[in-house]
Each structure stands twice: as structure tokens, then as C-alpha cells.
Image (spheres, helix red, strand yellow):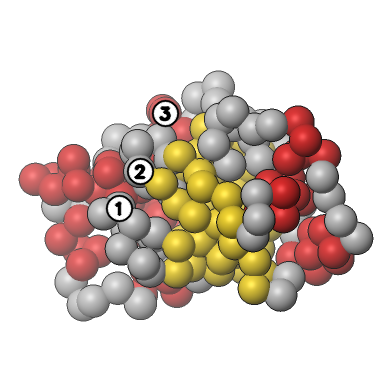
Amino acid sequence: MRLPISMAAAIALTAAVPAYADHHSGSGHAGSTIVETAVASPQHETLVAAVKAANLVDTLGGEGPYTVFAPTDAAFDKLPAGTVADLLKPENEGMLRSVLTYHVVPGNVTASQLVGMIQSNGGSAELKTVQGGMLTASLSGDDVILTDASGGTATVVQADLKASNGVIHATNAVSMPG
């Protein structure tokens, strides 16, 4: 899901891809921006608060396109006690921006395109994030798994929430830059 997506990777889809997309996808709010779509989601209240605290509303509400791996509220709840409160403090805005932009990949990459990239690249695809770090996407059965710089994993639990400036894939864990 890095910006230079090869056409072969985007087209190289197998029969498993529609099953994944049908089973895990949601329609989202195609007329709304990524931020507006997240605000409308009852599962992303912590993410929305973090985006506001990091002053990323205008960026993620901008033209894009962006692919966002959006941790759910339950994902943020898995972090050690006090982590979210610390990140939301004004003096930690830079660190919060780094964590949040680590979940954003330039371009509009659907679940089927991502699965195609993973399959055409021998089982994994490296995704360069807006933050500058890398996420590695792989498959476990029909699930897309993201591995962060420290080896932590997040599973895409809802895919293809479409927005006017990109797509959101909800995850069950917060990915951390190295």
C-alpha cells in the first residue's frame, strides 16, 4: 500500500479476494472525508480525539487520497494504562502525530488490491507510511495482518470503508513506529 502501486499487483487478484472483501467490508460514507467517516463511526472515538489533538483534521480531511489503518477504540484500550492520556497531552503532539501518521499510507488501496499485492509479492507487502516508516502486510487465512516496526501485529477487522478522499480499514491494534 505504498504510493507506487504496480498495476500488476492491483490486478493480480485470486478467487479468495472477493470472499475476503464480501466478508469484511463496509460501505463507509463515500461522500464524506476520512475524518467525517471516522467521526460518524462509534468505534473510532479515541482515534478522532487523537486526530484532533495532533492537529491532523485538515490533513486527513484534505484532498488525499489516503489509506488509513484505523485502530478501533478497543485497540486503543489494549495499550498500557495511561498511554492514550499521555499521547493526548499538548506537549506530546509530535509523538502523537508520528503514531497517527504511521497508520496512513498515501493512495487509495482497497482490500482486494492489498491482498493482490501480498500475493504477488510472495506473501507480504511493505507499505511506506506517511510517517516514513514501514508496515508489512501479510495474510493469515482471509485476514490481513499488519506488522509494525517493533513486531507488533494488528488485524484488519473491517475493510473498505470508503471516503471521498480515500479508504479506511479498521484494525484491532495500534501499530507503533520503531
* Residue pictured at 49% horizontal, 55% vertical: 136
Q: Amino acid at mark 3?
A: Thr
In the image: residue 99, left or right of residue 173: left
Element class at badge 3: helix
Question: Which amino acid, by three-letter code, is at mark 1?
Answer: Pro
The residue lying at 35 percent from left, 43 percent from top is 133
Which mark, residue 133?
2
Task: Tell me if 108 is positioned left or right of 79 in this view.
Answer: right
Residue 41 rendering spot, x and y as whole percentages: 57, 57
Please identify the quadrant where the N terminus is shown: top right
Q: Separation of disc 3 and disc 2 at Cα? A: 18 Å
Nearest to viewer (mark 3 / mark 2): 2
Which residue is rendered at x = 21% and y = 67% of the image? 83
Q: Residue at the location (39% across, 59% down)?
A: 148
Q: Percent position (x, y) of residue 159?
A: 68, 57
How crowded is the residue under tag 3: few (<14 C-alpha within 10 Å), some, or many (20+)?
few
Q: Position of residue 147 (x, y in %)?
A: 45, 62
Q: Position of residue 27 (x, y in %)?
A: 76, 51
Residue where numbered disc 1 is placed: 177
Q: On the image, numbered disc 3 is attached to which residue?
A: 59
